[in-house]
Amino acid sequence: MPIADADRSNNCSRRLRFRAITSLALFAALHLVSQAGRGAEIETQLPDGWKRTVAIPEVSFGGAVMLRESALTLWTEGGWLIVRRATADDDLEWQIVLARATDAAEPEVKIGERVSDLQVRYRDFFIRDAMGRLRVFREPKTEQSPAWPIVEFKGEPKQLGYSAGGILRGWKLDDWVWIQSGSIKDRPDTWLRLQHADLNTNGFGFGGFFGAMTYGKAQVSDEGDLLVASRGTFESAEQELHAKKLRDEFGTKSAPALAAKKWFNVQTPPAIEELRGKVVLLDFWATWCSPCVEKMPQVEALHQKFGKRGLVVIGVHSAGRSDKAGPFVKDKGITFPVLIDSGETARRYAVEAAPVYFLIDKSGKLVWGFSHNPPGDAQIEELLK
């Protein structure tokens, strides 16, 4: 082979070897970058086993407990962030599989100072819960999604039905109605204690294009990612059940006693049991309640018209924010007895909102009530007879 040809052949071989080495180096570099990227992705996740518990303080107003102390638990399992709310006795209120735990930043949790306004936010997803009003935006699930833990009911629940798309399923367990929800059939990602089983006064049923259910006053709707519910808390259920019992006993049971911290317009505070032979009108009100103030002249007019014929009107001011009650009574010319509630009177009469009015007959029995308007003249005339 000529020298010139040999040189060209050697140069060509060297170039091929250089290109091969360069390609291998580039491949190795890309592989390292890829592995580093994978490692970084793993490092940016909340690891399985991460857990946090947040205490939710008791909420009370005017001496009445509106929400008992409870706890919020957040943890990761199977690559998912799960959020659970339960009472101090560990009775489950709801549990939600919120989102894949693909962000190393811990979820943001906020609890309101004056009311139990609970907020959880992670990535673009959130949970808001305020006095039974629940709003959830969770990550949609598919058949290909990694598995998440399933809540198993303790006991033997009875299925009440399900929505057309199968998103919502209603169950009755012991004294409560529960909702299971999720876009994957037989793989719910949300469990919700909806309402006490005895509070279906308006019936119950399923409907809606996605999934909706009503049970008495409680209701829930779910689109697979966005869930909105108005549920009955333990405390609200207790109050509604007590109110139902009082209604059922109208005309058969003696009226509950009054519990006052202070009285106005009276020297000797009256007791319900000492007013037998009189007709008693109770007006539950507050100075900060606009409808209460607007209807106060009607109540004063009833006192003026029927007071000498045997009607006793008693105003029961809310225990909360009662410092302006005395000046208000004086400035507005209210002449019937008014008491500042200790909180116990409203509880005994299952008062949920003001104004609300009750009538007690001459025998001391509670015969009418839970009305947001004062009674008419004809009602009082009939009782006075």
Image: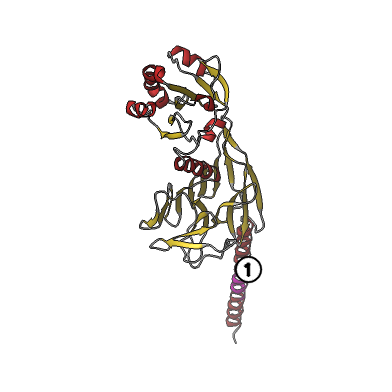
Q: Inspect this view and state whether residue 239 appears.
A: yes
Up-down: is 3 above or below 362?
below
Point out residue 164 in the picture as x, y percentages from the top left corner: 38, 62
Number of numbered discs overlaid on the protein picture: 1
Report the span colored magenta: 17-25
Q: Could you tell me residue 76's position as x and y percent?
A: 62, 56
Residue plotted at (50% across, 58% down): 172
Residue lying at the far left in this picture: please name it.
378
Q: Residue 101: image x %, image y %?
A: 58, 56
* SS at circle 1: helix
**Secondary structure predominantly adopted by residues drawn in magenta:** helix
Quadrant housing residue 377: top left
Q: Which residue is mark 1?
A: 28
Q: Position of residue 287 (x, y in %)?
A: 47, 22
Which residue is more in the foreground, 331 or 134? Answer: 331
Q: Quadrant of the C terminus?
A: top left
Residue, x 59% and y 71% (percent of image)? Answer: 23
Left or right of 273: which side holds 222? left
Q: Is 197 left or right of 294, judged from the image as shown? A: right
Q: Which quarter of the image is occupied by the N terminus?
A: bottom right
Q: Is residue 252 above or below residue 135?
A: above
